[in-house]
Image (cartoon, rainbow, N blue to C red):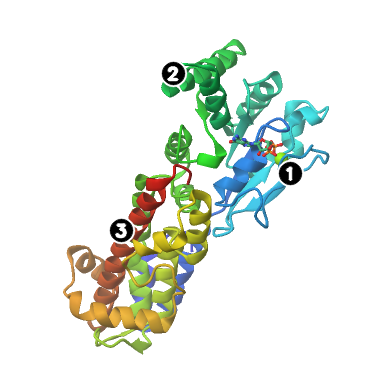
Amino acid sequence: MDEFNTEMIKSLMQTDPAAAAACIKEYLEKKNNTPLNIAITGESGAGKSTFINYFRGMTNNDEGAAPTGCTETTFESSPYPHPKYPNVVLWDLPGIGTTTFPADEYLKKMGFEKFDFFIIISDTRFRENDVKLAKAIQKMEKKFYFVRSKIDSDLQNEKRGKKNFNEEETLKKIREYCIHGLQKEGFESPQVFLISSFDLHLYDFPLLHETLDRELPEHKRRALLMAMPNINLEVINKKKKSLQSQIKYYASSSAAGAAVPVPGLSIAVDLTLIVSAITTFVVGLRLDVKSLRKLAHSTGVPVADLIEVITSSLAAVEITPALVMKCLGQLGSVVALMAGEEVSRFIPIIGIPLAMGLSFAGTYKSLNHILDMLAEDAQRVFKRALGLNSSV
Ligand SMILES: Nc1nc2c(ncn2[C@@H]2O[C@H](COP(=O)(O)OP(=O)(O)O)[C@@H](O)[C@H]2O)c(=O)[nH]1
Ligand SMILES: [Mg+2]
């Protein structure tokens, strides 16, 4: 089902709650698996593969990383799915300069239709090939974004040679130089994003995310957001809000497919669904063990220091039904089962019978409470990681 079919769910809830639960689950799964295909193009050595790796929360040396620092020999695009969100795929395109194709031919060979947008990377000013490509992409009614890479090394070089080095001014100079070059090639008011793939939280990468977020179709935004590294507190907060908006579905499905009575909640809920909801939160907020280890590695902050600031018992561990049972049991007394405003509004819409409604409200409140705790943990981890070292 593409859209949430409230009427169908409502009648199913009365006749066959388990089928209703399955339907809601399918809806959630589909919504969480929206494909997003991002094409990364630019000349050989521009930093495409490195960007693809760091965007996916990897380093150039990780298993499954796109090979870097090599001469491009094959004329093929390679897909690199995000390790946590395989619906989000970054495509490593060969530099158009390594071929003899004109831009439109190149795009056809790359299968341009499947891409949601293009990122054109250059580690210097944009060259003729980049411009031809951008114009061809425009003609095919697709979006493109100019990214100027390796800003960290520009800044370092500039610092070395100058007494009164000013970062802001240097950035402005590079930006203007790129924009000016593009204007000469016939782009009226081009936008250029300055980035360092090793430090995605710095320079213009956050702005690139904001821009993409604004220009992508509604249903694709979530896919991009969840795949984004935690570059700032705002992204963490947006992830929280996005996860929050799905809790009502988890809760209604869990109540409808009721199975296990949880101590303290005094009503039956489907624990596997709650486990899966919490796992989604933990992974989305990058509080799983693997993400924390990677963060520790890239920032040089020991993983124990990151774990130290975590207060919830659900982060940095494997989420099991037993653990969730324990946590919900403890929450049972804390979280009132009284339905909040959003809860009472949602229950009649979806047609949940009263007894289930109680369990819905319990699950809803508990999941909200858990998400709040996890989002706070994610913010603390972010601050702790950034406090001592600047790279994320
Ligand atoms: N300092 C710095 N070096 C980078 C950055 N991105 C890529 N590189 C280096 O530039 C070289 C070429 O990068 P690569 O990703 O292989 O470029 P590709 O040929 O476009 O895929 C490698 O040695 C990278 O380590 C960056 O943001 N900063
Ligand atoms: Mg490459």
> Would you place residue 49 above or below residue 195 in this image?
below
In this rendering, would 91 be left or right of 106? left
Instruction: Identify which residue, 248 or 328, lies in the foreground.
Output: 328
> Would you place residue 324 above or below residue 113 in this image?
below
Label located before the other in sequence (1 or 2): 1
In this rendering, would 254 be left or right of 2? left
Which residue, given by chain and number where applicable, does mark 2 sit on? 169
Label located before the other in sequence (2 or 3): 2
In this rendering, would 28 be left or right of 97? left
Which residue, given by chain and number where applicable, does mark 3 sit on? 376
Give the residue type that dot 2 points to: Glu
Tell me what residue is drawn at x 57 percent, y 56 percent: 87
- Measuring from the top left, give residue 250's x and y in whole percent: 37, 70
Mark carried by residue 77: 1
Give the residue type that dot 3 points to: Glu
For the question of whether residue 181 can be seen, the reply is yes
Measure how far apart labels 1 and 3 are at the Cα level: 39 Å
Give the residue type that dot 1 points to: Ser
Mark 1, Cα crowd under 10 Å, few <14 / some 14-19 / many 20+, is: some
Mark 3 element type: helix
Label located before the other in sequence (1 or 3): 1
> Would you place residue 218 above or below residue 72 in this image?
below
Tell me what residue is drawn at x 36 percent, y 84 percent: 258
Ligand 2 sits in which quadrant? top right
Labelled pair 1, 2 in contact (Cβ < 8 Å): no
